[in-house]
């Protein structure tokens, strides 16, 4: 396969080249034409599918740009209004047409003549969407699309003052690497106290989202939103019981490793007790890692790193830069978090993040860079729907890139000792992320199984789950008021419910690919590219198999991967 990042915007054949989404009235004729068109052969049907894919790509990209612009500047009311307009005036009117077009496809006598290997996952997803569609849910889903963005607006305003200067919470987190323990504690408390100021607004927002989501599920005939969401997310290949098995495996095989990591940290810092503001610090005399200076430096060094792996990977980043598809630095008024937003029509995605000069920003950049490469590799697929790959493979793309790239971080760290420390940081994160994934996932199961819960009940349950997955190594004495709202910093709970276990499943896949990479770098990269190039045209187990991986959430498999990671970590500590 010849790889090229010279991505081309899809050529329009059905929609006029100069058409821009403005109003529903201008959009509706395209959907009417598709609905009314006669389909008299398999060839007609495939041509119709391509036209439908084209208008879907145009609409999807317009919606994505509205969201990108709004998250880049949450203070501009016009950007918020443009996004809200799409959610309230366009999306709700699209949904009935989408349902009718889905039914037209499935009811066509020529649907069975389509290549089943090529169309199986797509047709399965269409049938699922038909089963879930309810007219009653259209206004609710429109409201939810708008409400979910309120999280970014609340969090984007959060700043603290440190040593006379104002910082976003992401920027202030740098001080947690300081040698000055009293400064670390002061900043930790300032960040947490700032979150406390908005805890009631966050509680209220989350409670409202839960009720509306529960209503969506009930309207569709489900007992609870969890069961509805599993179907909507297309979790055809694993169940809630598999998630519970994953939670137990984390307790059995990951928490003991985390205990060792924090005991080692405590010894390095020569502390009697490790407090939460100590976990990112280094011993006196060792300066915090400074992998880059600003957003442009982060970009340049990431390109250099990717070039060492595969020149195509670096070319993908270069193409995005050429198109202006990066917003990397943290600033006031910018929504929190980081994402790679695929742009279905133009092909080259957009990377958004809140870099503040820390090691964790390098991880975020290569992580989102992995997602970006996935977008490039899937762009050539025939239909927009083929590019809608499961999140459990999407996150393998990003998390494997974190691990692949480690051996090439000289771009960020010229000093060998700093490089070792960076790898240690990465491997610590690879292991320590698992309990948080289990906590967030288990919390969501309870929240939506018990939608009528009170805030006090929610808080008690959160603390109970948190305790279940905590180690004894960190002393949280006197910090319960902060810990009780720890979930509020996780935007997924607000914006993309139930999207979190995917990180755990994918981390297992990423470690599996990294094991391959340690044995045969080129073979592992070939498997990586092969799997990602399939987009969503195969089932999840088939996509894992294409990457040379086993789709397995069993404790025994997790134990094997954790033992390998622990051994690799011993090499750098």
Image (spheres, grey):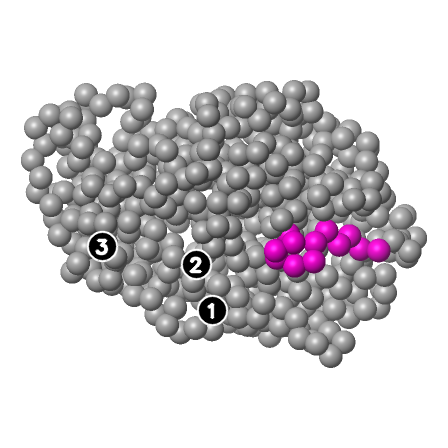
For mark 3, give the secondary structure. loop
Residue in the foreground of this view, choosing between 547 and 476? 547
For mark 2, give the secondary structure. helix
Tell me whether the residue at label 3 lies in contact with that at label 2, contact meaning CB atoms closer than 8 angstroms.
no
Please, what is the dominant secondary structure of the magenta stretch? loop
At x 46%, y 37%, the residue is 5
For marks 1 and 2 on the same chain, the one whose residue lies earlier in the sequence? 2
Residue in the foreground of this view, choosing between 495 and 463? 495
For marks 3 and 2 on the same chain, the one whose residue lies earlier in the sequence? 3
Q: Which residue was labeled with disc 2? A: 68
Residue in the foreground of this view, choosing between 469 and 464? 469
Horizontal arrangement in the rendering, residue 299 relative to residue 33 (left or right): right
Tell me whether the residue at label 1 lies in contact with that at label 2, contact meaning CB atoms closer than 8 angstroms.
no
Marks 3 and 2 sit apart, C-alpha to C-alpha, by 20 Å
Marks 1 and 3 sit apart, C-alpha to C-alpha, by 27 Å
Q: Which residue was labeled with disc 3? A: 19
Near mark 2 (Cα within 10 A), the count class, few <14, some 14-19 or many ≥20, is many
Q: Which residues are magenta?
A: 287-298
Task: Please tell me whether mark 3 or mark 2 is closer to you in this view.
Answer: 3
Name which quarter of the figure residue 237 lies in. Answer: top left
Does 182 sit above or below residue 13? below
Q: The C terminus lies in which quarter of the figure?
A: top right
Does 90 sit above or below residue 234? below
Name which quarter of the figure residue 251 lies in. Answer: top right
Q: Which residue was labeled with disc 1? A: 74
For mark 1, give the secondary structure. loop
Percent position of residue 23, x then y: 21, 62
Percent position of residue 400, x then y: 60, 34
């Amino acid at each position: 396969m010849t790889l090229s990042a010279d991505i081309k915007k899809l050529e329009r054949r059905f929609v006029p080249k100069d058409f821009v989404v403005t109003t529903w009235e201008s959009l509706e004729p395209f959907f009417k034409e598709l609905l009314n068109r006669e389909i008299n052969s398999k060839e007609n049907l495939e041509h119709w599918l391509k036209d439908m894919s084209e208008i879907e790509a145009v609409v999807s990209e317009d919606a994505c740009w509205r969201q990108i612009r709004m998250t880049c500047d949450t203070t501009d009311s016009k950007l918020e209004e443009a996004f809200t307009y799409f959610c309230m005036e366009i999306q709700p009117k699209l949904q009935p047409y989408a349902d009718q077009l889905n039914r037209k496809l499935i009811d066509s006598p020529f649907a069975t003549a389509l290549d089943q290997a090529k169309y199986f996952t797509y047709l399965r997803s269409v049938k699922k969407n038909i089963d879930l569609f309810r007219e009653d849910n259209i206004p609710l889903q429109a409201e939810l699309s708008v409400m979910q963005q309120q999280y970014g607006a609340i969090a984007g305003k959060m700043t603290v003052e440190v040593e006379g200067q104002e910082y976003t919470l992401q920027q202030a987190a740098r001080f947690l690497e300081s040698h000055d323990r009293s400064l670390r504690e002061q900043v930790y408390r300032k960040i947490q106290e700032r979150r406390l100021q908005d805890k009631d607004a966050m509680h209220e927002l989350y409670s409202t989202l839960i009720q509306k989501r529960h209503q969506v599920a009930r309207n569709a005939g489900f007992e609870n939103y969890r069961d509805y969401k599993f179907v909507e997310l297309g979790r055809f290949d694993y169940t809630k019981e598999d998630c519970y098995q994953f939670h137990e495996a984390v307790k059995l095989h990951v928490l003991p490793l985390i205990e060792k990591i924090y005991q080692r940290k405590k010894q390095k810092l020569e502390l009697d007790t490790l407090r939460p503001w100590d976990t990112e610090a280094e011993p006196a005399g060792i300066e915090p890692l400074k992998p880059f200076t600003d957003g442009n430096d982060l970009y340049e060094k990431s390109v250099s790193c990717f070039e060492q792996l595969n020149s195509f990977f670096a070319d993908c980043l270069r193409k995005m830069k050429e198109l202006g598809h990066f917003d990397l630095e943290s600033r006031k008024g910018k929504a929190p978090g980081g994402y790679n937003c695929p742009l279905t029509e133009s092909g080259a995605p957009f990377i958004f993040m809140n870099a503040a000069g820390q090691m964790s920003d390098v991880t975020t950049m290569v992580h989102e860079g992995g997602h970006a490469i996935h977008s490039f590799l899937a762009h050539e697929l025939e239909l927009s729907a083929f590019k809608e790959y499961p999140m459990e493979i999407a996150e393998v793309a990003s998390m494997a890139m974190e691990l692949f790239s480690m051996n090439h971080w000289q771009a960020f760290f010229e000093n060998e000792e700093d490089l070792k420390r960076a790898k240690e940081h990465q491997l610590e994160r690879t292991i320590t992320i698992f309990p948080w994934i289990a906590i967030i996932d288990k919390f969501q199961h309870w929240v939506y199984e018990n939608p009528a819960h009170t805030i006090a009940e929610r808080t008690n349950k959160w603390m109970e789950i948190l305790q279940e997955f905590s180690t004894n190594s960190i002393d949280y004495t006197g910090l319960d008021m902060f810990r009780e709202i720890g979930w509020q910093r996780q935007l997924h709970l607000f914006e993309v419910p139930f999207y979190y276990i995917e990180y755990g499943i994918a981390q297992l896949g990423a470690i599996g690919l990294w094991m391959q990479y340690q044995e045969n770098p080129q073979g592992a990269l070939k498997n990586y590219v092969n799997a990602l190039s399939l987009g969503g045209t195969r089932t999840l187990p088939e996509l894992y198999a294409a990457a040379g991986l086993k789709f397995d959430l069993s404790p025994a498999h997790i134990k094997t991967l954790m033992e390998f990671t622990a051994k690799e970590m011993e090499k750098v500590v």
